[in-house]
Image (tube, helix red, strand yellow):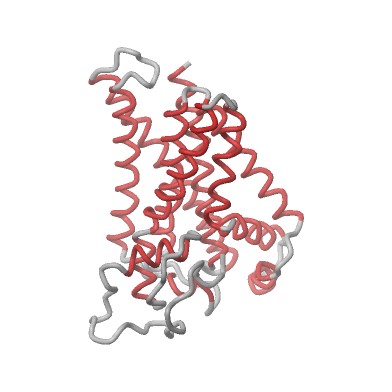
Amino acid sequence: MDATPQSPPDHPPAGEGETAPGDGGRPHPAGGPRFALGTLTILRVRVRRWDRAAGRAGMCWAPLAGLVVGAGAGAAGAGMVVVGAGTLLGAVVAVAVPALLTRALHLDGLADVADGLGSGKPAEEALRIMKRSDIGPFGVVALVLVLSGQTAAAHALFGHGWAVGAVAVCLAHVTGRAALITATRRGVPAARPDGLGAMVAGTVPPAGAAAGAAAVVLLGAAVGAVAGGAGGLGDPTGGVGAAVIGGLLGAAVTGCGMVAGEAVLRRCRRRLGGVTGDVLGAVVESTTTASLVIAAVVVGAVGG
């Protein structure tokens, strides 16, 4: 994930810390969504600014990119189920679409981080391994486990209905991108001086990171409450009690997903000294996968 934006800037990248003239160091209103969508997806959204102020805003808007990717994945998977192609094929499509919509950006980062950490080398050597274009055995194993885990979880979720699967897939991808807000909080340094990681590392204020984490947990609670109240989580009668239980379970799905991403971040920070674009990609995939797996367990437990 240590790369230039998916859609290149209109002008050469600004130096670290530079801002647009006359804006007092604050990104333009449209800068955050542009940065998030242009950097984290293949959408042809022109990134007009490439500096740390824009990077901060972009990371705060990263869940928007997750919503776009997750909605596309959920809709595609649900569509396969609705037309009778089966829940397994629906799950495969739901996992393939995000890779297409991001050019496998985060998966590439996950594989590079697995190779770097798996090498057992000191930080500088591990970072050199991560920059190589090839994928080693640890990277292959990580990709197989993550993709198979996502597919199995989505398959189980679509088995409870196309709507359940679509919503869970979308929520997992929003949660995965929300983890970028906390991963780029102030106090988390860059592991090297160049790349996307250096652009966004340490840019998000602690209050903003806490607000982002709280917002995604509340989103999970809201989704769970709606599903429970509508009778979609085991109790066909729904009601207030089912909504409360659903809200707690939904919060657990997103909250545990964020915890998994934080665990990966802390491991990389200890071993590598900070974050890189690859580390951010690994955090996204770890959070997304954990959210999907936990959702599958929760829905399976309460839905029979």
Q: Residue furthest front?
A: 83
- Is residue 158 shown above or below 292? above
On-image quarter of the N terminus: bottom right
Q: Position of residue 118 (x, y in %)?
A: 70, 57
Q: Quadrant of residue 251?
A: top left
Q: Residue furthest top?
A: 237
Q: Quick check: 231 left or right of 158?
A: left
At 31% from the left and 35% from the top, the residue drawn is 221
Q: Quadrant of residue 130?
A: bottom right
At 27% from the left and 80% from the top, the residue drawn is 25
Q: Position of residue 174 (x, y in %)?
A: 41, 47
Residue nearest the observer in this picture, 85 or 299: 85
- Is residue 31 shown above or below 96? below
Q: Position of residue 143 (x, y in %)?
A: 66, 49
- Labels in figure, total: 0
At 52% from the left and 54% from the top, the residue drawn is 101
Q: Quick check: 114 left or right of 296?
A: right
Residue nearest the observer in this picture, 90 or 196: 90
Q: Quadrant of residue 234?
A: top left
Q: Position of residue 247 (x, y in %)?
A: 31, 31
- Is residue 99 shown above or below 225? below
At 36% from the left and 69% from the top, the residue drawn is 56
